[in-house]
């Protein structure tokens, strides 16, 4: 399946896997999905992720994290902000704070993909890809 919007596709796959409490999910591997997975991992929303397959059939296998004995997903909400039809950019001083800092915004900057916190620290703005909490 060739998805136009790999980011929305990735978020939807993670969201669906969390709903049915899967331990891992597969998303097609692109430079962008790898970067988003890296940010999600560094912020503690997902466990490990690894690349499998080769060539066009490359996938990221992402381990999802749950808390408690009834396995509540760590990720409650994944929300796409900037879409192919409507890009959303934000200056460094206007970067959104998601739920007062509980959640993160994933921002694509000139220095790579990073969380809103990291972008503020590096004093860069960019395209607000999605919110996660």
Image (spheres, grey):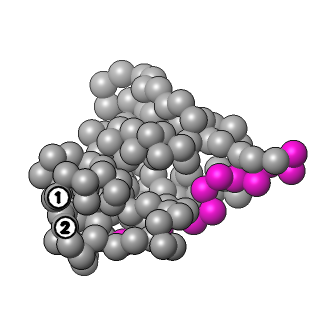
Q: Residue at label 1? A: 123
- What residue sits 63% from the left and 62% below the top? 76
Determine if the magenta segment contains residue 75: yes
Q: Which residues are magenta?
A: 69-81
Mark 2 vs 1, N-terminal side: 2
Return the residue nearer the eye: 87 or 9: 87
Rendered location of residue 122, percent (x, y) = 19, 52
Determine the residue located farthest toward the right in the rendered image.
69
The mark found on residue 92 in the picture is: 2
Q: Residue 17 vs residue 21: left or right?
A: left
Marks 2,1: beta carbons within 8 A:
yes
Q: Can you see residue 78?
A: no
Q: Residue 90 vs residue 97: left or right?
A: left
Q: Quadrant of residue 63?
A: top right
- What residue sits 54% from the left and 43% below the top? 44
| Residue 23 against residue 52 in the figure, above or below | below
Rendered location of residue 88, percent (x, y) = 24, 74
């Amino acid at each position: 399946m060739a998805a136009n919007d790999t980011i929305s596709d990735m978020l939807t796959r993670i969201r669906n896997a969390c709903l049915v409490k899967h331990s891992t999910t597969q998303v097609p591997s692109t430079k962008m999905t790898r970067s988003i997975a890296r940010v999600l991992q560094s912020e503690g929303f997902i466990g490990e992720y690894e690349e499998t397959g080769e060539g066009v059939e490359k996938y990221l296998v992402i381990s999802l994290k749950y808390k408690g004995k009834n396995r509540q997903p760590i990720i409650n909400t994944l929300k796409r902000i900037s879409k192919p039809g409507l890009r959303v950019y934000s200056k460094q001083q206007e970067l959104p704070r998601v739920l007062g800092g509980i959640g993160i915004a994933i921002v694509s900057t000139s220095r790579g993909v990073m969380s809103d916190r990291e972008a503020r620290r590096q004093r860069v703005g960019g395209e607000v890809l999605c919110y996660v909490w």
